[in-house]
Image (cartoon, helix red, strand yellow):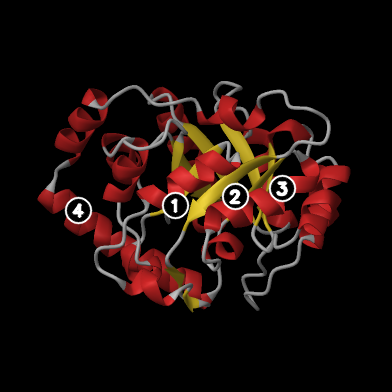
């Protein structure tokens, strides 16, 4: 774990402590159990598709620590993610990823509920999840899936969170950045039940913060089931999409490129035009 990631994890531990003080585990667990049934994120992105079609998880992302605000209007405190999610749905997205980290990404957990109220797509909470409390919190906020980043979790923590998400009928997107983390999580993909876990390869180098889709292409032969593989980050053109599709990638996650455009929905439609 590099220094930047380590600092984020330390911040998250404090956030979880404060969250538990405001809403004890038994309370957030009860709210999670009372939430509407989750939509099937796994099925939405892995459903059989024509040979040239690729499934897109389109992301709602206002800013990032490395790139800053993606557009000036995203600084607005009244930012509403729902119209962008609706545009993504109309452009053919299979699911939505939503940043909920406040400090680094200007996200908000309430965005998930607002998105689900406007579009029928399943929504993933994208955050730095290190504790079971956050998984219950995500489900209580109506999230259908959670991101589990291998680099910030021990093997025991990772397995426990995977089991909990499955018990809550949520999909887990397990994210890896390198060979070592892929080898560590690979035996657990599909545990405890197949149909609840997806494997994401993030194309961002955590040391330099640069992205390169060749990272997915270098690791793809180590993935046993390419049907559950997601290529994340650095996808900016139809040529990128086509290269990944030809290599056997059926799912991509795209956020920053789309959110930089004046019309994210039109940008998505153009990005996948050749593969539809």
Q: Are marks 3 and 4 in contact (CB under 8 Å)?
A: no
| Residue name at image x 56 percent, y 21 percent | 193
> Circle 2 — which element?
strand
| Residue name at image x 60 percent, y 39 percent | 92
Dot label at residue 175: 2
Q: CA distance from mark 1 to mark 4?
A: 29 Å
Q: Nearer the viewer, mark 3 or mark 2?
A: 3
Residue 37 drawn at (x, y percent) = 34, 22
Q: Give the residue number, with chain letter if any, for mark 1.
A: 84
| Residue name at image x 47 percent, y 33 percent | 121
Dot label at residue 272: 3
Q: Nearer the viewer, mark 3 or mark 4?
A: 3
Q: Is residue 170 left or right of residue 248?
A: left
Q: Give the residue number, with chain letter if any, for mark 4.
A: 19
First of labels 2, 1 by sequence position: 1
Number of other residues with Cα within 10 Å of mark 4, as a class: few under 14, some 14 to 19, many 20 or more: some
């Amino acid at each position: 774990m590099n220094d930047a990631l380590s600092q984020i994890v330390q911040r998250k531990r404090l956030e979880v402590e404060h969250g538990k003080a405001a809403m004890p585990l038994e309370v957030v667990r009860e709210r999670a159990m009372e939430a509407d049934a989750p939509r099937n994120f796994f099925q939405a992105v892995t459903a059989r598709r024509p040979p040239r079609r690729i499934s897109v998880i389109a992301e709602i992302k206002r800013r990032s620590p490395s790139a800053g605000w993606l557009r000036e209007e995203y600084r607005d405190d009244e930012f509403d993610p729902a119209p962008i999610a609706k545009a993504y749905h109309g452009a053919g997205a299979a699911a939505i990823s939503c940043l909920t980290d406040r400090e680094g990404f200007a996200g908000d957990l309430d965005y998930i509920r607002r998105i689900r109220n406007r579009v029928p797509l399943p929504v993933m909470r994208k955050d730095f999840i290190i504790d079971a409390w956050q998984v219950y919190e995500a489900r209580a906020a109506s999230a259908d899936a959670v991101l589990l980043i291998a680099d910030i979790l021990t093997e025991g923590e990772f397995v426990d969170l995977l089991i909990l998400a499955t018990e809550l009928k949520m999909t887990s997107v397990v994210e890896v950045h390198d060979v070592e983390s892929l080898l560590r999580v690979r035996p657990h993909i599909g545990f405890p039940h197949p149909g609840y876990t997806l494997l994401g390869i993030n194309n961002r180098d955590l040391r330099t913060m640069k992205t390169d889709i060749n990272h997915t292409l270098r690791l793809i032969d180590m993935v046993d089931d390419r049907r559950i593989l997601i290529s994340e980050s650095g996808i900016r053109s139809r040529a990128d999409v086509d290269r990944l599709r030809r290599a056997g990638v059926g799912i991509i996650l795209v956020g920053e490129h789309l959110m930089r455009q004046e019309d994210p929905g039109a940008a998505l439609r153009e990005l996948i035009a050749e593969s539809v």
